Image: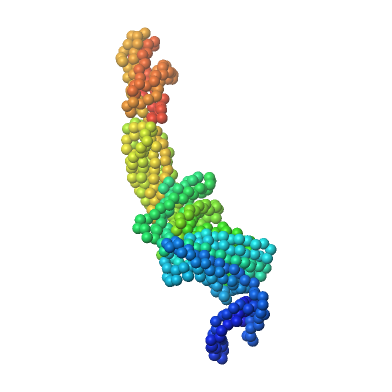
Amino acid sequence: MHEGDTSLCLANAWIDGVWANTMFPYKIGRPGMARGTVLQDRGAGVAGLTGALPEETTVTARATRVDTGGSENATSWIARRVVDASDGRYGPVTAAATSIAAARLFDQTPVKGSALTTTTIIVTDGTQTHEVVRRSVIDSGVDVVSAVNEDVLQMTSALSAVNDSGFARSSILSVDLESAISKERRAGKVVDVHAPAGIVWGDNTVRVSYLRHGVAATQTVDVTLTVPYGTPLEGELRVTGGAGSPQTEFDFEPDSDGEWSRDTVADVVANLREALPSDRIGIEFRPGTSLGENDGDFGPLPQPSPAAAEVTASVDTGLVMSGTATKAVTQLVVTRRAPVRYRSRARISGNVAGAEDGVIEIYRRYAGETTESKVATTRVSSDGTFSAYAPLMKKNARFRVVYLGTDSRLASTASLWIKTRAAVSARTSSKSVVRGKYVTLSATLAPAGTTGRVVFERHNGRRWVKLSTRTLRAGAANYRYKTAVRGVNKVRVRYLGSTINTTQTSSTKKFTVR
């Protein structure tokens, strides 16, 4: 290797021949028993000391076949200098050693399938010893036997990179890989995301659609995303399959800038422990982020806002996930409406922030009822506004307005109550009565069966004064009034309202007292 001072295994060997070359001749041989330690490796020659072996890292692996129950074990001892090297000269020797058990178990290649793996690494910085354990789901459409050591490769690369900085020291004491391997594929790909009720403060249901290997139907999983009160509700929702997998969390190359990092062993250990598994779907809501102009074939570019903190959530799937889905978050706002008259139409209008097109559906549920029905459909205009009329109103009603969303924008919902004034009609039993005689004042309300109370009132020339309050019976009430004032009397009926209908006043009725 021409690396000068070193600490590698010194072994005897059977030499089968010498490859003659004026620039770089070398021997072709088969190593035998380890005899000691190579201390010098130079152009002039190799020097070693028989006896004590170099510091070594113990690498163990246990592999089990799920279909047969068969298992294999393998143990290797690798010179610590090789395991801790961060310059790539020795290649993925440690990771290769952990795949020996799986290779023995199947004795073939390739093997498409999946594996459940547990990787355990013991590492020291010379002062403190740390244990790092990672459990993962591995899937490969090429060869799962070669892929079971993905975590080993990424974790040892991350730990050995500490040595580039020159002030921190990482030394891996042992590596252990346990794997349960199956020929069943465990792979999924995120293809879409929905928020059935939109994004609001508090808990939100985010529904992720994904494809599963070997299954024709699209699968879904619901994730709860909790948005703190006061967070801006416009932005972007992004779903990532395999969020936090080793491949995305760490990407160490031999010629990377690791020498300028000041991470300690403890820092890297903490990062490794916090990394999310590869079978997890990650949800990220970025408030204030909007989709900007299209960038050629790459679609709309996110326009970030640094003002608000990101909101995240995740869910485990048991599958190795890939793929992403991104949609702009819309906010539907409906305009409040004043109470409407009985058997009149209610106008539903508003704005969908973040939308330039799409369909609006409007549903109505009358007060006192448990079912709702769709009463109108309209489209969002280019400025985000919409307007529609509901059919004739009979009672107070709750309207649920739903923006269905598009391929690039999430759906959103809003609701409002619109009150309906009951129709109140008044009549008198006579148009002309003698003073001191009685006249019956009657009130009839619609819709039929309206409940609550009504007030019978008479105008005294300056204001309306109460004569009596009566409880409705089957939507009607009567009051027998003894006349006292000669001349034209004006009376009316005022409905006090209920949960079913809101207040309303009848037209004025007149009768003459002689």
Residue farthest along the right direction in this orientation? 127
> Which quarter of the rendered picture does the N terminus lie within?
bottom right
Residue 110, quarter of picture: bottom left
Relative to the observer, which residue lies in front, 252 or 497? 252
Q: Residue at x 54, y 52 (%)?
A: 308
Left of 387 or right of it: where is 271? Answer: right
In the image, residue 390 lies at what x, y percent? 34, 39
Q: In this view, does 56 lie above or below 365?
A: below
Relative to the observer, which residue lies in front, 18 or 401? 18
Q: Is residue 448 above or below residue 484?
A: below
Left of 50 or right of it: where is 59? Answer: left
Relative to the observer, which residue lies in front, 502 or 8? 8
The answer to whether one can see residue 170 in this image is yes
Left of 112 or right of it: where is 19? Answer: right
In the image, residue 140 lies at what x, y percent? 44, 65
Q: Which residue is drawn at 61% across and 63% down?
A: 122
The count of marks equals 0
Q: In this view, does 376 lie above or below 4?
A: above
Q: Which residue is drawn at 44% across and 55% down?
A: 327
> Which quarter of the rendered picture does the C terminus lie within?
top left
In the image, residue 413 lies at what x, y percent? 42, 45
Q: Residue at x 38, y 49 (%)?
A: 404
In the image, residue 468 lies at what x, y percent? 41, 17
The answer to whether one can see residue 344 in this image is no
How did the renderer colour the structure? rainbow
